[in-house]
Image (cartoon, grey):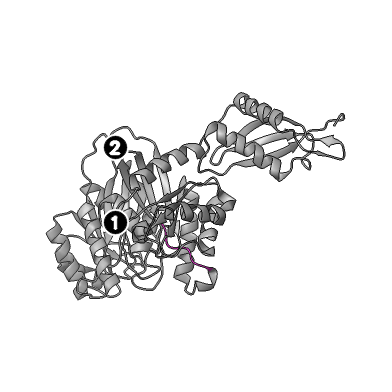
């Protein structure tokens, strides 16, 4: 059955992200005393009384604020409200009701959505303090006292939310979901890509590098299948990471790579390859993920008949350590080749999860060793007795040999290339585990 959507809204710094993390049972949203840390909508899952709930954390709402980022945060919060089945409106007992709370309450009442009023930071257990009764003035019914730091009152809060949840309906049988992390340096167009693919204003887009601070999950469905897009904060060189928030963001980006099946490594065509692109790609390669190199802003490049070919050749040299990764030229702003990108994502995910039978593997091995003899050293020849696949994601093969020392890297690459050619393992790293087995006749 589909998950009900519950949006957590309120003005900045009332503890929305702390409450969100408490409800979903993990630190998914960045929590910091700096107002405005959460900018985009962050999604997490929660289960209460047998119902699965999708909880949405939003940036703080400042109804009359003129700052560019803050105004976009307000748009994001409004989008979350429009998509929600129930809204949790978080206020702060320490400050009492302020003018912004009154404006937000008015906005929520106009939305027509059920609203649960949460009075946060009630850290003392017992009778409500006198300040609690002030929140009845917002016209949203009985407030629920909560301490998001300690977890007091969250059960009562979820009980109240549960009462407003829509009736359960059966959902279509769930197809295979592919998780796709969009990674790259800051300002290469990652959020623009997510917004274009979704057909809605899903992530904040700005020329200010570092606008996206959290990893954000977005579910989409298109002709190529069902996907969850994880838009990540741009990964910068360590020397440029000045504040603790950005350090958190890089940790989130690395966690996003770990959660993904496929990583789309975005490069800015107007700038070209940089050392940082190599480092970002290296994170995905080391994690064993399926990889695609997407050259964005291709519409902004002056081209002739050889431009793409020359650009591709240079990238193949720059990314020589991951020569398996396909390269695609796209434009997030115009949508150029985005259909092809998702066809590639599905193909690469399939390669990364491929399992090959031991019989088929050893047929390829026999043909490969017959074509190119294994290397020798001081009269002793490498013998590969057999291969078997240990795991998928990435495909990992165990090779039983008479001498690991004789199984040179170059011959491993040769065997790997034969396997790739035979089974079409495009876009995925391949790992080998070498096991020695004694052979007195070596």
Of the two numbered discs 1 and 2 on the same chain, state the one appearing first in sequence. 2
What residue is rendered at 82% in x and 32% in y? 438
Q: Main secondary structure of the magenta part?
A: loop
Question: Is the residue marked by circle 1 packed among few (<14), some (14-19), or many (20+) residues within 10 Å?
Answer: many
- Residue 343 located left or right of residue 101: right
The answer to whether residue 108 is left or right of residue 279 is left
Which portion, as a residue range, is magenta? 232-237
Residue 134 visible from this viewpoint? no
For label 2, the residue is 1
Residue 161 is covered by the magenta coloring: no
Q: Quadrant of residue 375?
A: top right
Residue at the spot x=56%, y=44% of the render?
429
Element under label 2? Answer: loop
In the picture, residue 215 is in which quadrant? Answer: bottom left
Residue at numbered disc 1 = 202
What quarter of the picture does the N terminus occupy? top left
Residue 63 position, x and y percent, is 20, 71
* Residue 245 rendering spot, x and y as whole percentages: 44, 69
As helix, strand or loop, the secondary structure at mark 1 comes to loop
């Amino acid at each position: 059955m589909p998950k009900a959507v519950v949006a957590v809204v309120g003005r900045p710094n009332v503890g929305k992200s702390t409450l969100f993390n408490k409800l979903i049972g993990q630190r998914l949203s960045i929590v910091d005393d700096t107002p405005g840390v959460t900018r985009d909508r962050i999604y997490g899952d929660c289960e209460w009384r047998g119902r699965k709930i999708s909880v949405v954390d939003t940036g703080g709402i400042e109804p009359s604020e003129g700052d560019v980022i803050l105004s976009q945060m307000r748009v994001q919060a409004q989008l979350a409200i429009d998509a929600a089945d129930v809204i949790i409106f978080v206020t702060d007992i320490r400050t009492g009701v302020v003018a912004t709370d009154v404006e937000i309450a008015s906005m929520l009442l106009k939305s027509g959505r059920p609203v649960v009023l949460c009075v946060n930071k009630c850290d003392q257990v017992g009778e409500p303090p006198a300040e609690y009764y002030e929140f009845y003035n917002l016209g949203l019914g009985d407030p629920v006292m909560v301490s998001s730091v300690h977890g007091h009152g969250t059960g009562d809060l979820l009980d109240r939310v549960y009462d407003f949840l829509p009736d359960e309906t059966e959902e279509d049988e769930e197809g295979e979901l592919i998780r796709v992390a969009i990674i790259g340096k800051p300002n290469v167009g990652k959020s623009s890509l997510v917004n274009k693919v979704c057909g809605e204003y899903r992530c904040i887009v700005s020329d200010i590098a570092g606008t996206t601070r959290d990893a954000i999950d977005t579910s989409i469905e298109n002709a190529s299948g069902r996907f969850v897009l994880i838009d990540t904060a741009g990964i910068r060189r360590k020397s440029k990471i000045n504040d603790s928030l950005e350090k958190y963001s890089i940790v989130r980006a690395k966690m996003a790579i770990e959660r993904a099946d496929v990583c789309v490594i975005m490069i800015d065509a107007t700038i070209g390859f940089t050392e940082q692109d190599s480092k970002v790609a290296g994170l995905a390669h080391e994690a064993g993920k399926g990889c695609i190199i997407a050259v964005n802003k291709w519409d902004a490049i002056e081209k002739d008949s050889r431009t793409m070919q020359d650009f591709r050749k240079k990238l193949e040299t720059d990314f020589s350590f991951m020569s398996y990764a396909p390269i695609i030229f796209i434009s997030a702003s115009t949508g150029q080749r985005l259909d092809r990108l998702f066809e590639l994502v599905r193909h690469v995910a399939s390669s990364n999860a491929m399992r090959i039978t031991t019989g088929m593997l050893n047929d390829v091995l026999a043909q490969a060793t017959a074509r190119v003899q294994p290397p020798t050293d001081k009269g002793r020849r490498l013998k590969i007795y057999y291969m078997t696949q240990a795991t998928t994601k990435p495909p990992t093969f165990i090779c039983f040999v008479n001498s690991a020392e004789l199984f040179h890297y170059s011959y491993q690459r040769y065997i790997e290339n034969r396997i790739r050619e035979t089974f079409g393992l495009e876009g995925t790293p391949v790992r080998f585990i070498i096991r020695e087995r004694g052979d007195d006749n070596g």
